[in-house]
Amino acid sequence: FQLVAVPLLALCALVPAYLVGDWHWPSFGAVFTIYVLQLWTFECMAQFFSLMPLILGVLLFVGTWFQCTLFSGMIIRGEDVIWPLRVLYYVLPFKWVFSSVSYSLFIDTPTYSGTARCTGERCPRGFYCPNITVLSCYGESGDEILRSLNLYYQSMAYKDERMHDFFIVLCFAIFFKTSFVMRFFRSI
C-alpha cells in the first residue's frame, strides 16, 4: 500500500505547487524523488510509534516532526544550537530534504531580470537590484539565488549534494522501518 499511496500523495502535493507557484518543471523528477522519500520516512516513523500506547505514540511522532522542523536550518542555524542538541540538526531529515529540494528547484531555473552587475567593496555579491531592497534581491541565476538564500537559511545548499542528502534520509527511513519490524515481531 505504501508503494502506491506515498507517491500518489507526493503527486497531490507537488503538482498544485508547481502549477500555482510556476516552479521550473524540469526539476520535478528530482523534487518528486526526495519528497517521496521524505513522506516514506515519516510513514516509517509513524509505524514505529504506532506500536506504543496511543497517546505516547502520537506525542512522540508529533514531537519528532516538530524537532525535524526546528532543527532543519530554516528556523535556527545549525551552529546556533548548543552541542548536545546540535546532533539533531545533523541527524533529522528535514535539513537534508530542504537542501536537496531547494538545490533542485533553483539551480537550473531560467535567469531572472532585475539585477545589475557591480564590482568593488560595496558590492560583495557581484550584483545588486536597483529597484528593490537588498533583502529582496537574491540574484539573476540559480546559483546566485542559492548562495543568497544560504546566507539566511543554512539548509539551502548551493553545492550539489543531493545523493548524499538522499542517502542520509534513506538511512533514517531504514532505521525506523527496521526498528518497527523488529519491535513488531518481538511483540507477537
Image (cartoon, rainbow, N blue to C red):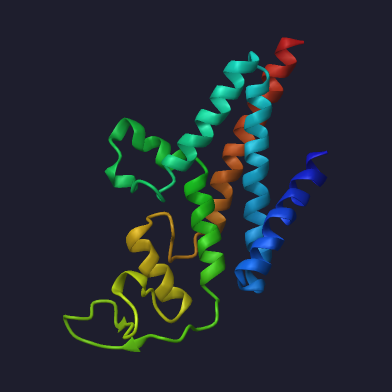
Q: Residue furthest left?
A: 121
The answer to whether 58 appears left or right of 95 in the picture is right
Q: Which residue is drawn at the image coordinates 65% and 25% (left, top)? A: 48
Q: Which residue is drawn at the image coordinates 83% and 38% (left, top)? A: 1
Is residue 13 shown above or below 147? above
Q: Nearer the viewer, residue 75 or 165?
A: 75
Q: Quadrant of residue 81?
A: top left
Residue 59, image x and y in percent? 55, 23
Q: How many marks?
A: 0
Residue 188, image x and y in percent? 77, 10
Q: Residue furthest top?
A: 188
Is residue 115 shown above or below 73? below
Q: Which residue is drawn at the image coordinates 34% and 79% (left, top)? A: 132
Q: Nearer the viewer, residue 68 or 131?
A: 131
Residue 30, image x and y in percent? 64, 62
Q: Which residue is drawn at the image coordinates 23% and 77% (left, top)? A: 124
Residue 152, image x and y in percent? 34, 59
The answer to whether 186 appears left or right of 163 in the picture is right
Is residue 144 shown above or below 78? below
Q: Quadrant of residue 27?
A: bottom right
Is residue 120 shown above or below 9? below
